[in-house]
Image (cartoon, rainbow, N blue to C red):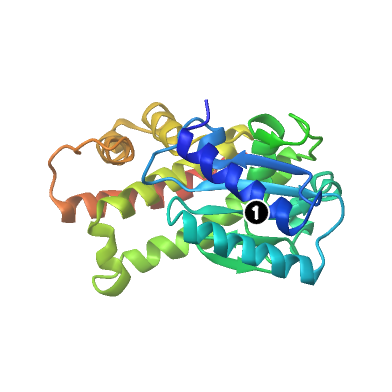
Amino acid sequence: MIPVQVHTVASRYLELADRALPQRIEGLYLVGSIALNDYQPGKSDIDFVAVTGTALLRRELDQMKAVHQALHREFRRPWFSGVYVTWADLLRSPLLAENAAFHYEGQFGYEGGFEANPSVWTVMQNYAIALRGMERPPVRCDLAETRQWNLDNLNAYWRQWASHNKLFFGRGLMMLADRSVEWGVCGVARLHFTIATGNVISKTGACEYAMERFPEQWRQIVAQALSIRRGHKPARIGRMRRRQEALRFIDFVIRDANSIR
């Protein structure tokens, strides 16, 4: 079941897009938390993949940028974020779709859409919700590529993210906040799941996976992240201690993921 708010925003997007570029948006798919049954009102974005028959021209992308600006004026939140690809793009490695145009949290980019990646392709193949186009479009998914991409993401983005948050000034103070604990703990657990299984999982599901997969010493910090994710008040532990445990957990998950063969 698509939440009413999500359906309203996505339907309005299609109206605006069809007015600007008639018959060009041939497929529209909801991915992310909506497709994985983990949409959190007031917290989650609406993630999409828009598919065209041929790549949009620069002037057409200018029009789509205006569409997103108009949509944002009507709906400030949730963000309507995603990428523009072709049917042919779905049949090849997403790592070759570096020229994918995208919209992310109010910013429109003409190339470099991060959401054209192996994890999103896996969601497209198995879980995406079709608002327009065939229910299950043909999508190329390579298990080894998906696992390696997630491992590279852990070793690059997440290792650096944790390193910055270990500082006791600037960004490091952000790790005292509930949102950063949720983001870090859920984020690395999701990637670990994909590296271990080749499939994708929601943030909530990733915490449940971590509770079962990892040693008991990590259950308290994972439970904290899960409570935050679900909108519950987390159990009382000192914010400094929680910060340290979250950062230790992230380091552990990165090391463990690198040991998976």
At mark 1, the secondary structure is helix
- Residue 110: percent from left, percent from top: 70, 69
- Residue 25: percent from left, percent from top: 76, 49
* Front residue of this view, candidates 28 and 85: 28
* In this rendering, position of residue 245 left or right of residue 149: left
Pick the quarter of the image with the C terminus: top right
Rendering quarter of residue 124? top right
* In this rendering, position of residue 213 left or right of residue 192: left
| Residue position for label 1 | 16
* In this rendering, position of residue 52 left or right of residue 8: right
Q: Residue at x 24, y 54 (%)?
A: 243
Q: Does residue 202 appear in this view?
A: yes
* Front residue of this view, candidates 91 and 154: 91
Q: Residue furthest bottom?
A: 170
Q: Residue at x 33, y 64 (%)?
A: 165
Rendering quarter of residue 98? bottom right
Q: Residue at x 39, y 65 (%)?
A: 163
